[in-house]
Image (spheres, rainbow, N blue to C red):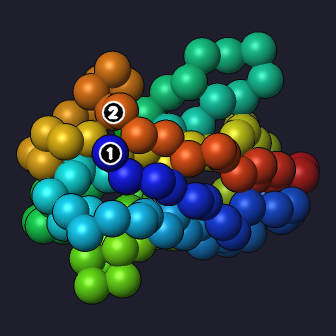
Amino acid sequence: QVQLVESGGGLVQAGGSLRLSCAASGRTFSRYAMGWFRQAPGKERDVVAVINWSGGSTYYADSVKGRFTISRDNAKNTVYLQMNSLKPEDTAVYYCAASPNGLGPIREYEYGSWGQGTQVTVSS
């Protein structure tokens, strides 16, 4: 398993941008697919974006396509989520997660390592 620490959350106005980072410990980071999930108050946790082990394949939830970009730097053991054109409905706790299935699954149960979460609040 890997240990994950998210950063970069905060309060932003609608239309603004934020960049989340997730730093991973361990030497095998490059073998893992990485995902960003989010949980809004009173709702289930949902997948936002996923990137495979090499960064060559990505997946985005329909609600964030064209606005969010997931990327990774295997040399720095870090995955990023660039969030542009933020909307109030993007308000949630955002979690970084790692899956040993390097291909990039989108099902939460395939992710065995999770960060503590970072709050993103978008005001209207």
Left or right of 64 on screen, residue 102 = left
In what element is the residue under mark 1? loop
Left or right of 72 on screen, residue 16 = right
Amino acid type, label 2: Tyr
Q: Residue 89: x and y, percent?
A: 71, 38
Determine which residue is flagged by label 1: 1
Left or right of 43 on screen, residue 77 = left
Residue 20 vs residue 5, the one in the foreground: 5
Q: Tell me the crowding category of disc 1: few under 14, some 14 to 19, or many 20 or more residues within 10 angstroms, Cα based.
A: some
Kindly tell me whether residue 62 is visible in this rendering: no
Q: CA distance from mark 1 to mark 2?
A: 10 Å
Residue 67 vs residue 50, the one in the foreground: 50
Q: Tell me the crowding category of disc 2: few under 14, some 14 to 19, or many 20 or more residues within 10 angstroms, Cα based.
A: many
Determine which residue is flagged by label 2: 111
Quarter of the N terminus within the rendering: top left
Q: Residue 113: x and y, percent?
A: 41, 40
Q: Residue 101: x and y, percent?
A: 14, 39
Amino acid type, label 1: Gln
Verify CB contact (< 8 Å) between mark 1 and mark 2: no
What mark, if any, has residue 82 been given in the picture?
none
- Residue drawn 33% across and 33% down? 111
Q: Earlier in the sequence, mark 1 or mark 2?
A: 1
